[in-house]
Image (cartoon, coloured by chain):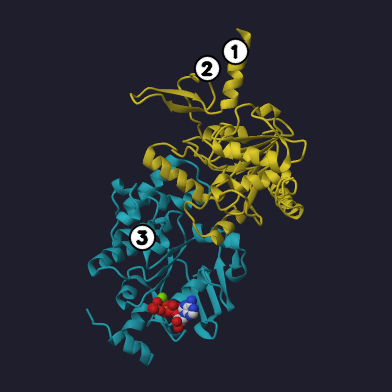
Chain colours: A yellow, B cyan
């Protein structure tokens, strides 16, 4: 028998209750950053300890967990987090978006549409969208309180002035339910439209900065823009080289050292499922 | 005149712990009037300016401001949200050190456009056109619009700070030693510019300076401060040409006459 024993999902019940209270508050005030007493987790900060704590607080024995990192289920980070929860919570894991009840993510929202009852947990490195221009936290807190968000547009203005268009491609700021401006974590802006009116619950955990925020199901999420420079997502001229999907987010893959390259799905599970289907049909 | 004062200050006082900042300050500022506050270092000029502009909270006294809609409001009891709105629409604040009043990390255009975006302008082209217009009014070439203030000279930074403040057509502008730290020739050009802007826009201004020449050139009226109190007050020409208080006489005689 192993001498080391864990409470279910690693965290003790009191800690989980504390995190759940923060989550409930975050859900009640969509987009608002709720401070919480983050715990040390048995992994380094860059590995998504904020997301892991949120997942640990919401997961139950019957849940099915999917973990993605940059769209794939098989990076070291995703594999370790999945293994961690298999070990400390004994939960089932999957790579299929449709089968998962809890999905922890770094840098992507799955292509397969989410549904009611699912929880998407984002790993967040920097929760404060105003920090770029206002480093003082005392000041950013007041700005959120007074809905004083002109600075976000100063950042977008700078983008257009220097690049001719809004060049921000990741962590593109959004306004939640017409009130709080929020950093959606470093997902590509391609994924921003998936956030609005999503049937799933979206939770965001920042471990190092000890913040939790949330977008409840069916909540309006608007990407900030200018009237004459409206928000646009990245477009890809070619379909995925492997599964032929269009209107999905593609990664550029370098094939050789002679400049050969191709564009393939960033969401590997979605890509594989599509290839399996076509394979079955033919 | 049937007009009412734009600012009515009564019995304003501010201490820093046991140390006196300023006390017993009462005066009216009229629309279109430029009031200079002069006095030696440590006499309480900045403290007074910061209390008036609500950047500091006074210990006691009242500051009543005539809002655009004609209503009169005590600034010392106004809510933070409304105060902030006033500060970036109806007022300007020009700091001695441009780095305190500018966003050094963003372009000149963004510096001028910030207030417009803060009050809800969401049209890039319009914001940029307004910024270009204001840059030209403060004599900054249009092709510098995308440069940051770090690439600007001290005089240009100060002119940019002024443009950034005036873009929302404020009615009241506070200035704390706006020409301090600049070369004499740069100062002269800035003063000229400030004088014509103040006149053309009909601004009400409270300007803190220890330079009596600046007061002479810009202001209609003066207050002389010493040890946190106003010791003499009157029309600028009268105070400078015929100072009544011995301290003011000393101050006036200490500057070389042109
Ligand atoms: N933050 C502070 N804490 C404590 N004392 C202060 C503070 N700021 C100012 N004082 C004191 O209040 C008095 C008035 O200072 P203030 O800065 O208003 O003078 P000033 O007339 O603007 O001087 P200067 O011409 O040097 O700018 C001085 O005795 C000063 O030391
Ligand atoms: Mg001072």
How many residues crowd around disc 3 within 10 Å: few (fewer than 14), some, or many (20 or more)? some
Q: Position of residue A264 (x, y in %)?
A: 49, 24
- Residue occupied by mark 1: A278
Is B59 drawn above or below residue B102 in the view shown? below
Q: Is mark 2 within 8 Å of ligand 1?
A: no
Spatial separation of the CA atoms under disc 2 and disc 1: 10 Å
Q: Residue at x 30, y 62 (%)?
A: B154
Residue A244 shows which numbered tag? 2
- Chain of the residue where label 1 is placed in the rendered structure: A
Q: Residue at x 37, y 24 (%)?
A: A256
Q: Position of residue B174 (x, y in %)?
A: 44, 67
Spatial separation of the CA atoms under disc 3 and disc 1: 72 Å
Q: Quadrant of ligand 2?
A: bottom left
Spatial separation of the CA atoms under disc 3 and disc 2: 63 Å
Is A241 drawn above or below residue A128 in the view shown? above
Closer to us: A142 or B74: A142
Quick one: quadrant of the C terminus of chain B? bottom left
Question: Can you see residue A49?
Answer: yes
Q: Secondary structure at mark 2?
A: loop
Outermost residue, front side: A1
Q: Position of residue B113 (x, y in %)?
A: 43, 50
Q: Are marks 3 and 2 on the same chain?
A: no
Q: Position of residue B7 (x, y in %)?
A: 52, 70
Q: Secondary structure at mark 1?
A: helix
Closer to us: A226 or B197: A226
- Position of B133 compared to A98: left or right? left
Tell whether label 1 touches label 2 (CB within 8 Å).
yes
- Chain of the residue where label 2 is placed in the rendered structure: A
How many residues crowd around disc 2 within 10 Å: few (fewer than 14), some, or many (20 or more)? some
Task: Name which quarter of the figure residue B95 lies in.
Answer: bottom left
Q: Are marks 2 and 1 on the same chain?
A: yes
Residue B197 shows which numbered tag? 3
């Amino acid at each position: 028998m192993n001498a080391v024993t864990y409470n279910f999902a690693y965290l003790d019940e009191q800690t989980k209750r504390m995190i759940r209270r923060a989550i409930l508050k975050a859900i009640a005030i969509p987009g608002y950053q709720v401070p919480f007493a983050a715990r040390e987790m048995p992994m380094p900060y860059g590995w998504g300890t904020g997301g892991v704590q949120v997942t640990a607080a919401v997961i139950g024995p019957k849940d099915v967990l999917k973990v993605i990192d940059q769209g794939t289920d098989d990076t070291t980070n995703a594999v370790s987090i999945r293994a961690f929860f298999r070990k400390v919570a004994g939960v089932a894991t999957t790579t299929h978006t449709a089968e998962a009840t809890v999905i922890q993510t770094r840098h992507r929202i799955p292509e397969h549409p989410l549904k009611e009852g699912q929880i998407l947990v984002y790993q967040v490195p920097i929760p404060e969208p105003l920090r770029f221009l206002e480093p003082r936290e005392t000041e950013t807190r007041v700005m959120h309180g007074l809905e004083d968000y002109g600075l976000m547009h100063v950042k977008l203005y700078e983008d257009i002035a220097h690049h001719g268009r809004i060049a921000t491609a990741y962590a593109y700021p959004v306004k939640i339910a017409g009130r709080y401006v929020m950093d959606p974590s470093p997902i590509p802006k391609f994924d921003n439209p998936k956030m609005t009116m999503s049937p799933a619950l979206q939770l965001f955990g920042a471990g190092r900065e000890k913040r939790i925020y949330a977008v409840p199901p069916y909540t309006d999420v608007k990407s900030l823009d200018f009237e004459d420079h409206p928000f646009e997502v990245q477009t890809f001229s070619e379909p995925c080289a492997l599964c032929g999907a269009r209107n999905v987010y593609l990664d550029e893959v370098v094939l050789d050292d002679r400049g050969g390259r191709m564009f393939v799905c960033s969401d590997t599970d979605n890509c594989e499922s599509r290839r399996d289907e076509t394979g079955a049909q033919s | 005149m049937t007009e009412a004062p734009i600012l009515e200050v009564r019995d304003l006082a501010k201490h820093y712990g046991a140390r006196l900042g300023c006390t017993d300050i009462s005066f009216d500022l009229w629309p279109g009037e430029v009031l200079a506050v002069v006095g030696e270092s440590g006499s309480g000029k900045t403290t007074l300016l910061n209390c008036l502009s609500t950047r500091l909270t006074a210990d006691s006294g009242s500051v009543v401001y005539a809002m655009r809609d004609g209503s009169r409001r005590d600034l010392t009891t106004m809510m933070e949200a409304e105060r902030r709105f006033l500060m970036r629409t109806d007022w300007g604040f020009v700091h001695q050190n441009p780095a305190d009043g500018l966003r050094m990390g963003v372009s000149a255009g963004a510096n001028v456009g910030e207030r417009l975006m803060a009050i809800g302008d969401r049209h890039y082209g319009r914001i940029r056109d307004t910024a270009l217009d204001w840059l030209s009014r403060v004599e900054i070439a249009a092709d510098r619009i995308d440069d940051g203030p770090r690439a600007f000279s001290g005089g240009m930074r100060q002119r940019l700070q002024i443009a950034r403040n005036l873009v929302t057509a404020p009615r009241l502008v506070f200035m704390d030693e706006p020409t301090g730290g600049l070369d004499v020739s740069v100062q002269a050009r800035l003063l000229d510019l400030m004088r014509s802007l103040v006149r053309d826009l009909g601004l009400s201004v409270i300007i803190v300076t220890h330079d009596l020449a600046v007061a002479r050139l810009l202001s209609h009226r003066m207050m002389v401060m010493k040890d946190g109190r106003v010791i003499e007050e009157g029309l600028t020409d009268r105070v400078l040409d015929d100072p009544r208080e011995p301290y003011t006489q000393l101050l006036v005689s200490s500057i070389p006459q042109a």
